[in-house]
């Protein structure tokens, strides 16, 4: 084993601080540790350079090490970074969120997505006085907190009763959600969901969910961790013309700096406040570093760059060219049914299937392995403003070479080509 890999696992459970960075998510020829990033490239401890499509687990949307954003962050550090009372930077960031998003009348900042999604759930329960929360089966992650993880196969360490109040429905199937409201009348506090999957809402699904929530006295929550600052500057809620009661953001808010936000209607958000004398308190979320000035300065500057450079349009344009290019290569090799890119151009997704047209983790691992051999790290497709024409050409060359190997594996024995353990789902019961 690589010495860094040994040291990581000796000191850090899982070898990283989020399971999505774990060894079991990458082929074995992937670098086990990275030293730095620059634009859309990353460099390992040996100085090897890889074109990256992971982009900090989708959190980096402008580019690694962007000096303009880093300078804005540094200027806030020199102001003291974390003061004893609320800062002017904190107020400016809150005003920016409220001005940017029509659905947001108040906002609470935190450092990561789980904190704000759990806060949204707490608000929905406090506002309605109910226990149950509904989430879609098709959207795999909302929080590391017990209310959500207890509803997955990862039950160890969580009292069984915690997950029983999280119930599930199918995205784009309004009847499955109606059945939950029928099964738990006047008991569902809220529905929390991402605005889209790879297929997007059909038959006005998001508006149907919102209407169903409101008819049943539940809170409608949109989680924009992935879609925010990528589908549209104002989030996928703007792209799909839907206004939630509460919404959560993170990841691409600040080009990789740690910022997350819960926002929404004043009527609901204010119950986490302290001004209403005599009202029973809701301990919403309270974090020493939630309003750290450096990260909020990065957020403010990131929004400026997104607006000035029309970055979101770049995601759509580059993603369209990348999707078309990868699919054209696959079609040309006769692999249209085994490898294809789907989804929204601003956030595409590639699918790898075996000869029987079943999704194949072994073949996905082989593709990722070959891409790394060709200098591209592509665990999934997260685009950034740093991905430009040069990177598109490099990527498509790597895809051509990698899919030629995938084709040989499909025609023969994958064991002749796969030199790695197969990547595994994050959400699995056993290691």
Image (cartoon, rainbow, N blue to C red):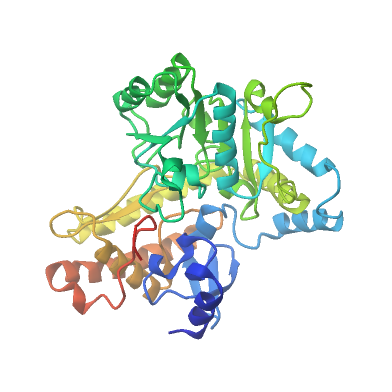
User: Closer to the camera, 211 or 401?
Assistant: 211
User: Closer to the camera, 312 or 90?
Assistant: 90
Is 228 above or below relative to 104?
below
On the rendered image, what quadrant is the C terminus found in?
Answer: bottom left
Total count of labels: 0
Is 38 above or below relative to 99?
below
On the rendered image, what quadrant is the N terminus found in?
Answer: bottom left
Is 312 above or below relative to 153?
above
- Residue 365 shows in this picture: yes
Q: Quadrant of residue 87?
A: top right
- Residue 346 shows in this picture: no
Tell me if 371 is positioned left or right of 273 in this view: left
* Residue ID at (36%, 62%): 396
User: Closer to the camera, 320 or 301?
Assistant: 301
Residue 185 drawn at (x, y percent): 39, 19
Tell me if 141 is positioned left or right of 406 in this view: right
* Residue ID at (18%, 70%): 409
Residue 302 drawn at (x, y percent): 67, 48
Residue 365 drawn at (x, y percent): 31, 67
* Residue ID at (32%, 56%): 326
* Residue ID at (47%, 54%): 382
Residue 7 drawn at (x, y percent): 54, 80
Q: Quadrant of residue 103?
A: top right
């Amino acid at each position: 084993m690589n010495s860094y890999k040994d040291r990581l696992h000796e000191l850090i459970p899982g070898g990283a601080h989020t399971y999505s960075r774990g060894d079991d998510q990458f082929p074995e020829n992937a670098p086990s540790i990275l030293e730095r990033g620059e634009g859309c490239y990353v460099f390992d401890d040996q100085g090897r350079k890889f074109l990256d499509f992971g982009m900090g687990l989708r959190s980096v949307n402008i580019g690694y090490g962007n000096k303009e954003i880093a300078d804005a962050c540094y200027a806030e550090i020199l102001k003291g970074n974390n003061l004893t009372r609320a800062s002017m930077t904190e107020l400016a960031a809150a005003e920016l969120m409220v001005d940017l998003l029509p659905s947001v009348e108040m906002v609470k900042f935190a450092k990561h997505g789980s904190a704000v999604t759990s806060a949204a759930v707490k608000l929905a329960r406090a506002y309605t006085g109910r226990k149950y929360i509904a989430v879609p089966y098709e959207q795999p992650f909302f929080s590391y907190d017990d209310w959500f993880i207890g509803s997955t196969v990862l039950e160890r360490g969580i009292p069984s009763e915690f997950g029983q109040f999280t119930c599930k429905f199918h995205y784009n199937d309004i009847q499955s959600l109606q059945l939950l409201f029928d099964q738990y009348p006047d008991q569902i506090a809220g529905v929390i969901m991402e605005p889209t999957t790879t297929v997007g809402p059909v038959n006005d699904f998001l508006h149907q969910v919102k209407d169903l929530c409101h008819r049943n006295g539940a809170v409608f929550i949109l989680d924009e961790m992935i879609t925010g600052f990528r589908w549209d500057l104002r989030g996928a809620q703007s792209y799909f013309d839907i206004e939630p009661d509460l919404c959560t953001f993170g990841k691409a808010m600040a080009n990789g700096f740690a910022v997350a936000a819960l926002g929404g209607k004043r009527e609901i958000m204010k119950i986490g406040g302290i001004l209403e004398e005599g009202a029973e308190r809701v301990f919403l979320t309270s974090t020493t570093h939630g309003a750290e000035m450096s990260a909020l300065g990065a957020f403010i500057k990131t929004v400026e760059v997104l607006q000035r450079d029309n970055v979101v349009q770049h995601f759509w344009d580059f993603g369209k060219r990348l999707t078309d290019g990868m699919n054209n290569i696959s079609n040309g090799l006769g692999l249209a049914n085994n490898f294809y890119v789907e989804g929204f151009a601003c956030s595409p997704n590639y699918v790898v299937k075996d000869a029987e047209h079943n999704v194949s983790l072994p073949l996905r691992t082989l593709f990722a392995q070959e891409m790394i051999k060709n200098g591209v790290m592509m665990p999934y497709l997260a685009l950034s403003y740093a991905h430009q024409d040069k990177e598109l050409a490099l990527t498509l060359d790597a895809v051509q070479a990698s899919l030629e190997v995938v084709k040989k594996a499909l025609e023969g024995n994958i064991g002749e080509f796969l030199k790695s353990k197969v990547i595994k789902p994050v959400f699995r019961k056993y290691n």
